[in-house]
Amino acid sequence: MKFQRIDGRVAQLDASHSEELSAASRMLLRVLEDNAPDATDPEKRGLPFQPRSYRDFMLFERHYYGTAMGLTSLYRPVVNKTARLFSAITGADFPLFKPHALWYRQPIFYQSNHLAFYADGAPITYPNYCEYLDVELELGIVLGKPLYNATPEEAAAAVAGFCVFNDFSVRNGQMDEVAR
């Protein structure tokens, strides 16, 4: 879903599914107000606890590939058209958009801002340069104790709970950030 900043707010660009998305869009617009609570105080953000760390793992190969297709359609359209043509002719995925070999050998993650968590219904701010806001529904696993090279049994025993959350990403800034 693509969003665009209009009058300091984010609005949905593609209205082809407006009936299905109208309730979600209204809720998103309500959440994306510019008056966020104090980010340093978890109680003001409605959190039951302050996460001490946050790692976001990319676990599904199709998501990895789909992200590459989506980002190139926005920022590298010639590459995207080449990939689509390759797939149409061969029936295979474009090799340059598949995960690197390391992805298949070990968990790949990025470490994000653990102070950027807000409770349900809290207003969320986003940068003024936001033109394309991506919202992903994610499953969170809360660990109750530290892990290092854990066995599956040790990892399962360390799970203190689960949560579902939305991950907001400013995609139009991501290409430059990753390149640095």
Image: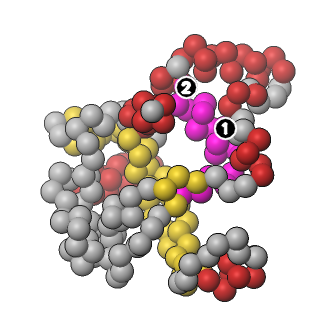
The numbered disc on residue 171 is none
Q: Which residues are magenta?
A: 56-72
Q: Is residue 122 visible?
A: yes
The extreme right residue here reads 90
82 relative position to 42: left or right: right
SS at circle 1 = helix
Query: Against 167, is 140 above or below?
Result: below
Colour scheme of the picture: secondary structure
Picture residue at 16% right of the left edge, 36% below the top: 7
The numbered disc on residue 65 is 1
Picture residue at 40% right of the left edge, 51% below the top: 168
Picture residue at 24% right of the left edge, 78% below the top: 43
Q: Name the residue type under label 1.
A: Tyr
Q: Is residue 18 visible?
A: no
114 relative position to 122: left or right: right
Picture residue at 52% right of the left edge, 76% below the top: 142
Identify the image quadrant of residue 167.
bottom left
Q: Name the residue type under label 2.
A: Thr
The magenta stretch spans residue 120: no
SS at circle 2 = helix
Give the percent coordinates (x, y) of residue 91: 83, 26
Find the distance from the CA under tag 1 to the CA under tag 2: 11 Å
Identify the image quadrant of residue 9.
top left
User: Counting other residues with Cα less than 10 Å from the Cα at mark 1, is it few (<14), some (14-19), or many (20 or more)?
Assistant: some
Give the percent coordinates (x, y) of residue 47: 32, 76
Say whether disc 1 or disc 2 marks the residue closer to the N-terminus: 1
Query: Against 46, is 13 above or below?
Result: above
The magenta stretch spans residue 66: yes
Query: Against 20, is 51 above or below?
Result: below
Give the percent coordinates (x, y) of residue 3: 36, 38
Query: Against 73, is 3 above or below?
Result: below
The numbered disc on residue 72 is 2
